[in-house]
Amino acid sequence: MLDVIVIGAGPAGVLAALRAADLGAKTALVSRDEFGGMAANDGPVPVRTLAHAARLIRDARQLGQYGITVSEPVLDYPRLLARVREVVNDVRAHSALRGQIDSVGVNVCEHAGYARFADPHTIETESGLRLQGEKIILCTGGASRRLSVPGFELTATHSDAWSLSSVPPSMLVIGAGATGVQVASIFNAFGSRVELFQAGSRILSSEDEDVSAAVTVALRQSGIMVRENFGTIESFEETSSDVRMVFSKGGARHSSEATLAVVAVGWVANTAELNLTVSGVEIDPRGFVRVDDFLRTSAPHIFAAGDITGRLMLVPQALQAGFVAATNAVQGATTTLGDQVNPIGSFTDPEYAQVGLTEKKARETHEVVIANVRFDSTTRTIIDGRNVGFCKLIVDRATHTILGCHVVGERAVEITQVAAIAIAADMPVDDLARVPLSFPTYAGILGRVAASAARQLNLKGRWQAQEPEELTP
């Protein structure tokens, strides 16, 4: 019998297997498909590759502003898909985690198919594998949520969008969270006519309201039709060449047609094939596996980490959760995730990112100071011709610590990583303002907005301005 069986070889599963083996546990890692899971094969890696291609197209169209004459860029989509496969294979081949997994003796079972519980300590896979373990860690991830409407089988998921053989002339994207907005942004850059539908009052509803508003304006200016509060979907229908979505609002029926309809209305846990009733593992009302602070399920010997738990469903958080689950599986309930600083962002056009509290949430429990610097007033963005966006800091008036940072615009994700370090370190905003960040850089924009916040807090005596932006003629 094995000490630990980890089901799922995405970020959470890989880290869980590595940690368990590092602690001396005899460990097996069971993967339905390829090592790396969705993150490497159908998530951030291929998606970011397509997003980079979209960025290159936008950059090429800007070259004339800098005296560089080129013809209009033309996308060879099959060649781009080949590049995506090259990147995925290259990332997998150079994965440091795979080398570490092999070096500590983890038994990696790839292409095993779906795994299911035969009894609380035994799993079986479609490939015929049968393993017994003292402890089991579930890391099977998630999948796009399906809608119970007629004709749903005519729609696609974001995964289908990435694997198209050609760029569709038109596209409906239903759901304007992070995934939907990213699909819309990328394929708009590739030349598709895109309509983006959001059931609620604003897109990116989990983001700060200023971020949501700015991204909405930018998407519309780029040619995307953004439709908030669009109503209720009644059905999807097949036409001679398109897919038609029929929806109703206020008693009136409407429809929209496109070559492809992509539905991105949420994420559900991959639990259907696990036969959890045999294991004693309970799910919560949302359909995710219920875990305690130690990532232990209702069955004391079974743990869960990553998307299957319904917590922040992102790669860095999954890695940390895998580490914690494995530590507790091997050593007992000793470690929790605790309060984490979680920077989140997306490589859309424009990029957007956040860390910490939104302004609305911060005002519920804090007296705050808001500092905001627009990208059309910062040197690096003007140099690069990328002057759409802003950087916003939310600071606690009493403690001077940073409660949140929200950025829209070029390199927003990178700027927010710096803010995340400052928040994790409980750095007072005036201390951040004193860091002489290089000029002209995108990270330097954060120093400027920190200095603005410090001035509002009357902390001039505690910091020396490092703001060449304001001194530049």
Image: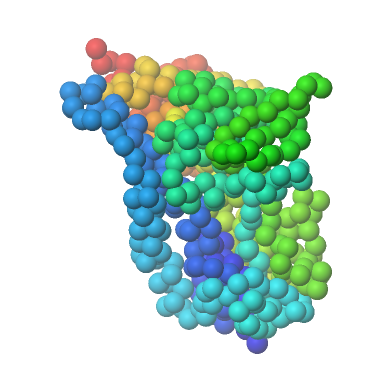
State the residue lying farthest toward the bottom: 1
**Residue 420 pos. (x, y %):** 49, 40
Determine the residue positioned at 65% across, 35% down: 244
**Residue 234 pos. (x, y %):** 76, 35
376 in relation to 401, above or below: above
In the image shown, does 236 or 456 lie closer to the viewer? 236
2 in relation to 81, above or below: below
In the image shown, does 90 or 207 lie closer to the viewer? 90
State the residue lying farthest toward the top: 473
Determine the residue positioned at 78% across, 58% down: 283
Residue 457 appears left or right of 467: right
Please say whether residue 92 is visible from this viewpoint. Answer: yes
Determine the residue positioned at 67% across, 49% down: 153
State the residue lying farthest toward the front: 240
Residue 90 appears left or right of 138: left
Residue 191 appears left or right of 309: left
Please say whether residue 393 is visible from this viewpoint. Answer: no
In the image shown, does 292 or 458 lie closer to the viewer? 292
**Residue 119 pos. (x, y %):** 77, 79
Determine the residue positioned at 56% across, 46% down: 158
